[in-house]
Amino acid sequence: MESSDRTQEAGRNGAAAEASAKPTVCFLGPISSYTHQATLQAFPTDKFNLMPVETIKDIFTTTQSGRASCGVVPFENSTNGVVVFTLDQFADRAGEFPDLSVCAEIYLDVHHCLVGRHSPQEEGQAGREQPLRHIQRVYSHPQAFGQCIRFLSSRLRGVETIDVSSTSRAAELAKADPTGSSAAVSSAVAASLLGLDVLARNVEDREDNTTRFFVLRRGATTTTADAPIPELEEVLDEQRRKRAGPEGAEALVEGEGRGGDVYARTKSLASFTVPHRAPGALADVLESFRRARLNLTSISSRPSLAAPFRYVFFVEFEGHRERDPEGRVRAALEGAAAAAQSCRWLGSWDSMR
């Protein structure tokens, strides 16, 4: 082997070793999806390998199996509410994800575009009011469609809408149509990456449209998980510093939150089921959080599938299981477990808003 060949091979081997040494973070792909953009916001590529997967369930499966150290999933949108595909995986009806918990959250401002191909007859008519008569079908994720109802009903009334796994996959399908009659509700990033035209910008119903993502990992907490991930700890510490600001940095080190309330800076997620015919069973579980003086920030439910019209309930509340100086989170979870048929803590993290 020539010296130059050996040098090139050594370089390739070194790069591969360096890549394998970095923790892997999986996300809902393809590349340029909003989940990918949120992942890039929190996980720099010089410290993490980023792995696109096809479905939200794949994120849970890949992280549970250990093939990825972390996974990033969309959890809720400010316009269209909770992402039911993610909530269904948290329900974990088949017990597939016993080791997963939430360790962080990411917020991403979401501005949708209609992307596709300009009609040859309308090539020179750029702008939001460009005629869209050539569009026969639109692809996107159901959540994205739900965030753009006004645009779809006013500019694309009667056009077929087709649900797909992600907005970036939608853009790929629009590009693959040789007739140019397909479009996608996707992002300007996806349009640029795929060489598509932006037919309309900012088609979301609300200017403040924001999606919140959760970071999943194996283990109860970042300190008691299967193995410490120093790179993840650096990311979380940086998030805490940004959230606290210069004035709050010292208080953050001392474990204090806004106004001296350690509970106000953190959140937790738990799920539970209740006896279906026991009067007040749901109220009894929720009362546990009131007694502990913990603020509930959201309540959701999904069918348990144990029987028709039985539910798994989810509560998100202020407070952290591992940073609980007054024992309020412990008391609430113990009270909920005593009143519920089943109860599971699903993670605690620092609030980013």
Image (cartoon, rainbow, N blue to C red):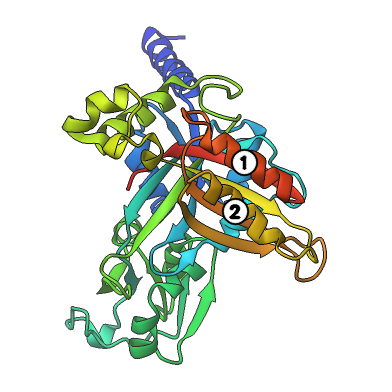
List the residue tagged with mark 2.
287
Q: CA distance from mark 1 to mark 2?
A: 11 Å
Q: Is residue 102 visible?
A: no
Up/down of 73 relative to 232, above or below = below
Which numbered marker is on residue 28? none
Position of residue 120 measured from the top left corner of the image (x, y, whole percent):
27, 83
Residue plotted at (31% across, 22% down):
253
The amino acid at mark 1 is Leu
**x, y percent for residue 207:** 25, 69
- The location of residue 252, given as percent across then percent down, is 30, 27
Residue name at image x 62 percent, y 37 percent: 100
Secondary structure at badge 1 equals helix
Would you say 127 lies left or right of 290 here?
left
* Above/below status of 236 relative to 26: above
Badge 2 marks a residue whose secondary structure is helix
The answer to which image quadrant residue 114 occupies is bottom left
Residue type at mark 2? Glu
Residue 60 pos. (x, y %): 61, 44
**Which residue is outermost to the front?**
291
Task: Name the residue tied to disc 1.
Answer: 333
Near-viewer residue (138 or 1): 138
* Number of numbered discs on residues: 2
Q: Indicate left or right for 65 with 327 as reference.
A: right
For residue 219, above or below residue 80:
above
Foreground: disc 1 or disc 2: 2
Sequence-wise first label, 1 or 2: 2
Label 1 environment density (alpha carbons within 10 Å; few <14, some 14–19, many ≥20) = many
Task: Answer left or right for 276 relative to 119.
Answer: right
